[in-house]
Image: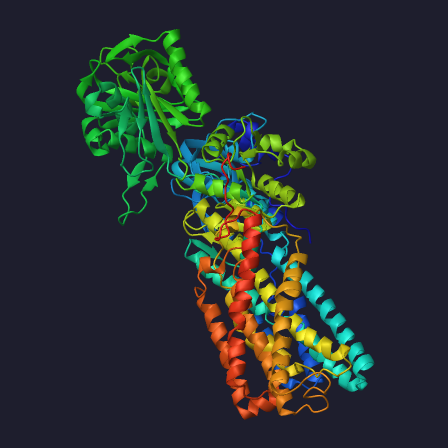
């Protein structure tokens, strides 16, 4: 069976260019709507108006996937090897680690993919339509192309359509564009070729809502064919990609497996060839060494490190949905961010007022009436200047917006209506006026609504006090060019003077200066409606734009912007210092976008490249990649274009974080390495598509999250360094035993090695996973996503420095017991041919304890990379402290209690043995502190690990 297309074929590309009366014929409908029979026929042809659900992954498969990745498989195999080697206790321990970690990861990460359901919730369940000549309510899913929808203020729009009738119709398209300002709609034909669908003023879209006015719309597309449906399709078809950490863990697993197998083979051959043990005995010994070289604690440490970072991030206004996303943040090299509400406060604010007399600066930000109007250092109120009073009063009265006070102290004001108009009310309050007082003094009696063709609106007011001899006035607010062209005079110094070319140029120069700074400018003028003016109709019902909006008196300019958040500039500077590029992708205009980008430091060059959506359509991927190497701003972007930018950045090898709040952002959020949705203004769709949600909608919170992400990766490397260095003191004594042909007895038994790996090492290693970010973590460039966890630097430090120190002190402890018990060269060592010799048992216990005590010093050393551990506090990590206490208690426990002595081949230690052991941690610590001090001096780093910025004289 053929799938319905959800759209009328052939006619749609030019539907915006047709006059309203021709649209109905082109879509095979009429002003009386479809007949019931025709609607049923269309539904059979086009299908239901539904967002189709994507096929979901089974929860069972999602659960099992936590036990079938490479590292988990390696642990299952390690358990089997332990079982074959006759060590069932080890098998149980390894498998428990795997099970607990898998269940914990599933609990943390299991989130049903609800993006499609969220999309459905945004569509209304019922809609008003005209059918059979009558207005009726139908289910939204029963809409078909050709239906005539009746829209009123507050309605959600259920399908894409062409406006055929509009009365001050304004639509909130923020779910599609990310811009919060309502968009005025018209029924007029639109013939401009370079407009995106969202910019076309006679088209409306599913998932948006009517913020003001009313109108009628003929449906053109339904279901998956709508702009809304296309976004749903993009989101559903997005393949989940592995995070950088997941790729590195897979790579590490292969490296560890190969290394462990090679060591097993080597120890097997050495045991057979040098010690001449039997094949079965050598095989069991080699299997034990294979298990010993597998870092069983890696998965729980990674999971705990991520979980602890998630907790810290939640306290810094970032909620993480997926654990692996934390580390992906840490490797982020590019942040693609929206402008409105993320970089800016999403609160339009009047910051300048301009009259022919003077320019005013308006202080204060947002909708709270806190701030002053100042000029030349002096504070001004409306009572001080009639010109200022007319400007702010006219702006407030020629507005339909309202402000609702916050419900609690410190809360946000709620805007009812256009945010651009709401800020005019605030400027009047800062001038000492109130809307209630103005409306009592000059009540509105008529309105000529805004039209995109006219680019202005007019309100008529009855006056209690005459203005220029009139008891009625028309305030006109709109685009400066339009208002100035209709003005025949202007107010200067309280007098009305004729408008001439010089004055007109002076006004437009001021407007152009503000516009060049990316500010939004409205002009205000008025016309006194005198009773003796014969050009004015007697009846207000006969007032039209043609007979009222003429012979105006220009008052001034109202200049506004959505101001940047105060903390964003510092956050952007921190990104630059950390080697992270910030790219703005917005639905706003290019000039405004560049202005904000320059103010907060995203762009610093004189002429950054600015791409509009239309220009991007004409740009090849190669040209786009070239542009992305420099400073670039993207404006008026459609959802698929934002997705394209993200894909090209990823193809360039970047790790990309994307912020967004609207439905339009969801494809890019899902495609990004880390999708970041806004918690306050974000739609459910954006939140479901994202990996992380900002509870304060603040760009600075992303930077904090990146800091935590970098700390996670650093902590995993600290764990790797710590866990690997104990392999050397485990392996070297065994190698000495093998190479000596058995003349040096085995300093450590297999069970003692496993005691270190699964017992004493685990808790301190887990404690390293909870380390907070180091002081210099944001002074480092983003790490190469291809850089292996098990890098050459980590291996050299683990094996050739920490490991050799541990091996040296461990073997020294073993020999200390032999010598103190009477051994000397020329006689056989205690334990040769006698595994249960008391001296030998004590010597192996001493070797085991020496490794544990050297690891105490090593875990302190691993807490910082180059900074002195004393700069962060030797005992400041409580988890590490608990781990150290646990491993000391465990050693004491298995050496004192007889049932465990036989299992672990241990015996009680003497007082002199403990004196020897207690000296090891400070010696290890001081040796590493000396090494770190040399490194810091060589690289000009202070003891906190932060690079010392030299003055020019010292360089």
The image shows residue 920, relative to residue 933, as above or below, that is below
- Is the N terminus in the top left, top right, bottom left or bottom right quadrant? bottom right
The image shows residue 266, relative to residue 498, as above or below, that is below
Near-viewer residue (253 or 372)? 253
Near-viewer residue (620 or 90)? 90
- Residue 722 lies, in percent from the top left, at 58, 66
- Is the C terminus in the top left, top right, bottom left or bottom right quadrant? top right
Q: Is residue 874 left or right of residue 79?
A: left
The residue drawn where x is 62% and y is 33% is: 616
- Residue 502 lies, in percent from the top left, at 38, 7
Near-viewer residue (809 or 596)? 809
Q: Is residue 433 left or right of residue 740?
A: left
Give the number of marks: 0
- Residue 39 lies, in percent from the top left, at 55, 45
Residue lying furthest right in this view?
273
Can residue 116 be seen in this snapshot? no
Can residue 459 be seen in this snapshot? yes
Near-viewer residue (606 or 544)? 606
- Residue 551 lies, in percent from the top left, at 33, 12
> What colour-coding does the image apply?
rainbow
The image shows residue 320, relative to residue 188, as above or below, that is below
């Amino acid at each position: 069976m053929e799938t319905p297309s959800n759209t009328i074929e052939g006619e749609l590309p030019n539907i915006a260019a047709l006059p309203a009366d021709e649209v109905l014929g082109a879509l095979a409908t009429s002003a009386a709507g479809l007949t019931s029979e025709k609607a049923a026929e269309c539904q059979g042809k086009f299908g239901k108006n539904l967002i189709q659900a994507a096929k979901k992954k089974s929860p069972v498969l999602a659960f099992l996937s936590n036990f079938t990745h490479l590292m988990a498989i390696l642990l299952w195999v390690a358990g089997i090897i332990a079982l074959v080697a006759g060590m069932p206790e080890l098998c149980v321990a390894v498998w428990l680690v795997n099970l607990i970690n898998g269940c914990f990861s599933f609990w943390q990460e299991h989130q049903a993919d609800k993006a499609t359901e969220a999309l459905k919730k945004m569509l209304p369940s019922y809609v008003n339509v005209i059918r059979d000549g009558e207005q009726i309510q139908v289910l939204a899913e029963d809409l078909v192309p050709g239906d005539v929808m009746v829209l009123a203020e507050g309605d959600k729009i259920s399908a894409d359509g062409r406006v055929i009738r509009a009365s001050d119709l304004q639509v909130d398209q923020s779910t599609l564009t990310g811009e919060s300002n309502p968009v005025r709609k018209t029924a007029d034909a639109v013939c401009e070729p370079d407009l995106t669908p969202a910019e076309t003023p006679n088209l409306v879209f599913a998932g948006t809502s009517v913020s003001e006015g009313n109108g009628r719309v003929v449906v053109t597309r339904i279901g998956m064919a709508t702009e809304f449906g296309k976004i749903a399709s993009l989101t559903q078809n997005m393949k989940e990609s592995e995070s950088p950490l997941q790729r590195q863990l897979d790579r590490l697993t292969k490296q560890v497996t190969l290394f462990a197998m090679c060591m097993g083979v080597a120890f097997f051959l050495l045991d057979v060839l040098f010690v001449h043990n039997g094949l079965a005995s050598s095989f069991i010994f080699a299997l034990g060494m294979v298990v010993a070289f597998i870092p069983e604690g890696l998965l729980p440490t990674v999971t705990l490190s991520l979980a602890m970072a998630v907790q810290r991030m939640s306290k810094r206004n970032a909620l993480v949905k997926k654990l692996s996303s934390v580390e992906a943040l840490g490797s982020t090299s590019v942040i693609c961010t929206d402008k409105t509400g993320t970089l800016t406060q999403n609160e339009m604010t009047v910051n300048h007022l301009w009259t022919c007399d003077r320019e005013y600066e308006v202080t204060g930000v947002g909708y709270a009436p806190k701030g002053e109007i100042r000029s030349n250092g002096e504070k001004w109120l409306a009572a001080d200047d009639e010109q200022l009073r007319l400007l702010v009063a006219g702006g407030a009265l020629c507005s339909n917006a309202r402000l609702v006070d916050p419900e609690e102290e410190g809360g946000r004001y709620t805007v009812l209506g256009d945010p651009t108009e709401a800020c005019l009310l605030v400027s009047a309050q800062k001038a000492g006026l109130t809307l209630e007082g103005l409306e009592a003094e000059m009540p509105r009696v008529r309105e000529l609504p805004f039209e995109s063709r006219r680019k202005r609106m007019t309100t008529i007011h009855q006056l209690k006090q005459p203005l220029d001899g009139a008891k009625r006035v028309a305030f006109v607010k709109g685009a400066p060019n339009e208002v100035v062209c209709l003005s025949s005079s202007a107010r200067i110094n309280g007098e009305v003077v004729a408008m001439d070319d010089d004055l007109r140029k002076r006004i437009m120069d001021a407007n152009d200066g503000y516009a060049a700074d990316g500010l939004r400018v409205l002009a205000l003028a008025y016309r006194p409606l005198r009773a003796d003016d014969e050009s004015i109709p007697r009846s207000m019902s006969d007032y039209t734009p043609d007979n009222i909006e003429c012979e105006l008196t220009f008052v001034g300019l109202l200049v506004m912007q959505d101001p940047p958040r105060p903390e964003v500039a510092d956050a952007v500077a921190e990104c630059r210092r950390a080697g992270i590029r910030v790219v703005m992708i917005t639905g706003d205009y290019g000039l405004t976008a560049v202005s904000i980008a320059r103010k907060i430091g995203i762009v610093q060059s004189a002429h950054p490249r600015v791409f509009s959506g239309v220009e991007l359509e004409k740009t090849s991927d190669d040209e786009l990649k070239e542009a992305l190497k420099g400073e670039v701003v993207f404006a008026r972007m459609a959802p698929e274009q934002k997705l394209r930018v993200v894909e090209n950045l990823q193809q360039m090898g970047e790790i990309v974080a994307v912020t967004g709040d609207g439905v339009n952002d969801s494809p890019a959020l899902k495609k990004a390495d880390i999708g970041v949705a806004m918690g306050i203004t974000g739609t459910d769709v954006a939140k479901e598509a994202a990996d992380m949600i900002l509870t304060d909608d603040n760009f600075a919170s992303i930077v904090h999250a990146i800091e935590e992400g970098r700390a996670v990766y650093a902590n995993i490397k600290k764990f790797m360094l710590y866990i690997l260095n104990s392999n050397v003191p485990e392996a070297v004594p065994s190698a000495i035993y093998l190479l000596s042909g058995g003349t040096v007895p085995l300093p450590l038994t297999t069970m003692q090695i496993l005691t270190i790996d699964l017992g004493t090492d685990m808790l301190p290693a887990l404690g390293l996973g909870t380390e907070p970010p180091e002081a210099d973590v944001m002074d480092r460039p983003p790490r190469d996503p291809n850089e292996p966890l098990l890098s050459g630097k980590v291996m050299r430090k683990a094996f050739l420095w920490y490991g050799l120190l541990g091996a040296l002190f461990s073997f020294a402890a073993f020999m200390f017991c032999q010598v103190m018990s009477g051994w000397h060269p020329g006689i056989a060592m205690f334990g040769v041919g006698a595994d249960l010799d008391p001296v030998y048992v004590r010597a192996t216990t001493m070797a085991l304890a020496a490794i544990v005590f050297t690891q105490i010093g090593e875990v302190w050393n691993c807490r910082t990379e180059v900074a002195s551990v004393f700069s962060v506090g030797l005992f400041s990590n409580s988890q590490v402290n608990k781990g150290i206490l646990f491993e000391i208690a465990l050693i004491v426990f298995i050496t004192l209690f007889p049932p465990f002595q036989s299992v672990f081949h241990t015996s009680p230690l003497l007082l002199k043995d403990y004196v020897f052991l207690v000296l090891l941690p400070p010696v290890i610590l001081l040796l590493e502190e000396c090494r770190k001090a040399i490194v810091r001096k060589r690289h000009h780093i202070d003891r906190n690990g932060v690079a010392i910025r030299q003055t020019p004289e010292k360089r």
